Image (tube, helix red, strand yellow):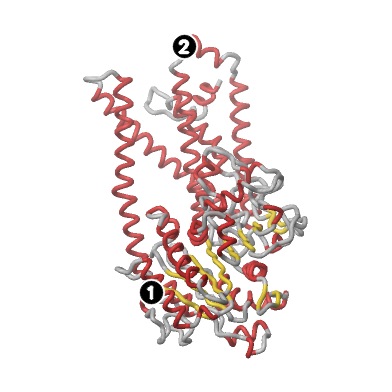
Amino acid sequence: MVLDIAADISPGLRVTRRRRLPTNLGAGLLGAEITSWIALSPSLLPRRWWQTAANVAVCQALGHAALAGLTWSLDQIPARYQRQFNTGLTVASRNTTHLMIAGMTAWFTVRSLQNQQRAAELIEDPVRRGYREGLLGLIVGTAGYGGLLLLGETAQYTTDRVTSFLGRWLPGWVGWPIAAGGATYLLILLSNKVVLRRLIADITRQAEELNKAVFPGTSQPWEPERSGSPWSLEPWHAVGSQGRALLSGGPRARDITQVTGLPPDEVHEPIRIFAGLVRGRSLAATADVVLAEMDRTGAFHRDTLVIHTSTGTGWITDWGMSAVEFLTGGNCATMSMQYSFITSAVSYYIDHDTPVQAARILIEKILARVEQMPNPPKVYVTGESLGAYGTCAVFEDLDDLLARTDGAVFTGAPRFTDMIQSLTAQRDAGSPERLPVIDGGSHVRFVAHPAHLNHDFAGLPYKNAWQHPRVVIGQHASDPVVWWDLPLLYRRPDWLREKGSRGVAAPAAQHLDVPPGFRWFPFVSGWQVGLDLAMSIKTPGLHGHNYHGEFMSYWAAVLGTRHGIPVRLTPAMERRAVTWIGQNTVRR
């Protein structure tokens, strides 16, 4: 029956005047149509048109290959057995099947456009990622499938010709694998050596040039408490573009007084220290510059030290750094250093050891100094994305982190982060993978929203009181950086298996962050979430890979006290601080 339906799917098409489209090609078209239903299913984030196009094209090509291959295999069955597949098949049943398939395709298309619009509304971005983007992507993706089909036919033709040539000396069952394997090897070789390496070289060169840029709105600081200032041991030109943005921005003492309402005599000028990546200077030497800057600015005499591990480009979130400065009244020092020019994804592909080395060198040097002090300041560690990965890798486990620091905030940590994987695997029974509960919430709390600081995934109070040191691990339900990994291609994860655990961002409101129609399919789900990575930072705060205003609540919970008084974050102060940070963040 499958063979007959596939053969009839395009009865008017002919390869020559006397021959219809080959049966396995017709089956491939049928397979492409069926897999397009899965390709149109929702993912973590609503897609831009080109994401939908890539998803549709690849999934249709895979469906084509799968059903065409099945048909070819069935064609090898002797004719007397093939007749069993066509028994009882009538013209009416074939037409009914065609109509059913066409109707299902139309239904899935309409449903996918509705899901796209709903997903865009969930992340508060309905204009740029609505149903029009979905419809355009479907059209372009189908055209892209046609292009992949032509490439596949070209590859098949080349393989057949090589097999025919090898047939002079080898039987077909030996020649064909050699031809196919050789073609695949050449494709991979060319992709790696010609395309991929050249692309990485171009990205690296462009990133190094971008590192020399000065973003609009950036200017050299004139406060002695900041690196890059005229009094700094680290020149302004050496801190890189991300360092310049970081050192130029952020609240000053006058801003902290205005936003928090604290008396001016209780407010300090916050210290910001950053060392850039300078060619010929080792990571250890860069860390030594950071320590020298700490001595120069008096950072070791502040109540609070926060060590940041940057992402690949040296980027550090303004939201997290500014939140600490407001909450401590400026009585803090924040330190970081750059270890790469390029973005996190490419940086990890090229060298995933350097972020860990950079984090370890800086953290160990600072902790060694602090441990020698009779009245040491409180030390916190933090990082977002690849920065969270690097920081977590410095410590053997949670106990080591709690023993050596006064707390931590990690946001958007990649799924391959060992410490977070280990904690998730050890979660309390009944808690979901997306928001695991660790030891009743004693020291660590996984959050997708500030409401989870005090209530678990089900909206219930934690079993145990939250003790210091405290660790907050922020991971949005719609953040593909948090949820993508290689096994997602072939194995359904717990976060897609557990009923009711997906997408609840705020227990009180039951706000959904991810479309409830998101289901796992082999390869397709991994491919879809992989595509989501490209647009993960193009979302409003509290969604995707953007962690913004929630930092005020996270750091207020972790810091604990200021001058022996518990840090109190009032709603009014939070609104003023979030507004100030949003209006004064340097665009980069």
What amino acid is at disc 2? Ala
Q: Which residue is mark 1?
A: 213
Pick the front one: 551 or 147: 551
Query: Can you say whether 151 is above or below 76 in the image?
Result: below
Pick the front one: 497 or 14: 497
Q: Are marks 2 and 1 in contact (CB under 8 Å)?
A: no
Q: Secondary structure at mark 1?
A: loop
Residue at 42% x, 60% y: name it: 357
Quadrant of the rendering where the N terminus is positioned: top right
Upstream in sequence: badge 2 or badge 1: 2
What amino acid is at disc 1? Ala
Percent x, y of residue 569: 70, 74
Residue at 56% x, 49% y: name it: 421
Eye-nearest disc, 2 or 1: 1
Q: Secondary structure at mark 2?
A: helix
Percent x, y of residue 397: 55, 54
Q: Which residue is mark 2?
A: 79
Query: Can you say whether 384 is above or below 259 in the image?
Result: above
Residue at 63% x, 36% y: name it: 103
Pick the front one: 169 or 292: 292
Residue 447: tell me if it is visible.
no
